[in-house]
Amino acid sequence: MKIDIFTHILPKKYKDLLYEIAPSNFYLKSVIETLPTLYDLNYRFRIMDKFEGLMHVLTLSSPPVQEIADPVKAVELAKMVNDEMAEMVYRYPDRFPAAVACLPLNNIDAALEEIDRAINDLKFRGIQMETPVNDKPLDLPEFMPVYEKMSRYNLPIWVHPLRSANYPDYRTENRSKFMIFSNFGWPYETTVFMTRLVFSGILEKYPNLKIITHHSGGMVPFLEQRIIGSYDHAEMLRGAKYKQ
């Protein structure tokens, strides 16, 4: 058995509604249409069949609901896609062992309710959070109730980075070039989240918290020694300052 724990899906009913409400210049539409495996299970199953014992844990593909909808509509979208993913897990248990809940993160009270519904009623095995959330970092106080609840459930949070082409590579420009926003910006966003998670004290406050990051953990595994050396040096300088 091989389980891919971070595969994306865009259920058909949700996809159709997404296209109705998304802006006319919706930047991901052209990408989605070139990836039928996101919304056509026949395509997905044909690829899965090439790998014996392969199973997919389902997570919603970009864009996150809070990016395309107001706090009220986002709740409707989250519930809709969670119901669709739950139906897929129920119909194809040999393909999809579990699903991960989409949350309306621009409406925290509703997100907390959806966590309970998804885990208790739909039998989901965790939640997904995007970083950042409408340009806000995930270590803000408003997100602490989500961490507290998931710590109590003792289930993981899948974290997916987000950055669009209108995030420039340099402050003197207006847009990113050469797919830099995606190829390097997304791992960077993951790394920023991981760093803020550690130094904000969230892991100490919620010791049961479980985090799954996408794209091989951003830059951290590849820059391990640079990270250690940098923070060790900073600590040394801080100690020298205090001695003076």
Image (cartoon, rainbow, N blue to C red):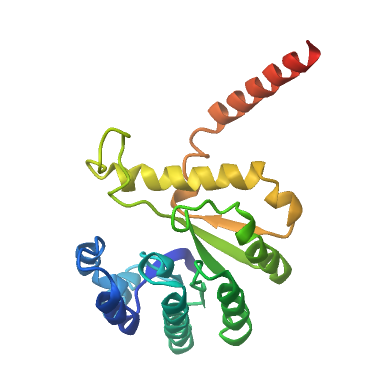
Quadrant position of residue 49: bottom left
Q: Residue at x 48, y 48 (%)?
A: 190
Q: Residue furthest top?
A: 244
Total labels: the figure holds 0
Q: Nearer the viewer, residue 57 or 133?
A: 133
Quadrant position of residue 153: bottom right
Q: Nearer the viewer, residue 117 or 172?
A: 172
Picture layout, residue 115 above or below residue 198: below
Query: In the displayed structure, does residue 197 sit left or right of residue 83?
Result: right
Please say whether residue 95 is visible from this viewpoint.
no
- Residue 244 x, y percent position in the rendering: 78, 10
- Residue 178 x, y percent position in the rendering: 22, 41
- Residue 143 x, y percent position in the rendering: 61, 60
Q: Residue at x 34, y 80 (%)?
A: 14
Q: Residue at x 60, y 87 (%)?
A: 121
Q: Residue at x 31, y 37 (%)?
A: 169
Please say whether residue 102 is visible from this viewpoint.
yes
Query: In the displayed structure, does residue 112 sit left or right of residue 72?
Result: right
Query: In the displayed structure, does residue 212 sit left or right of residue 73?
Result: right
- Residue 188 x, y percent position in the rendering: 44, 42
Picture layout, residue 107 above or below residue 79: above
Picture layout, residue 200 above or below residue 31: above
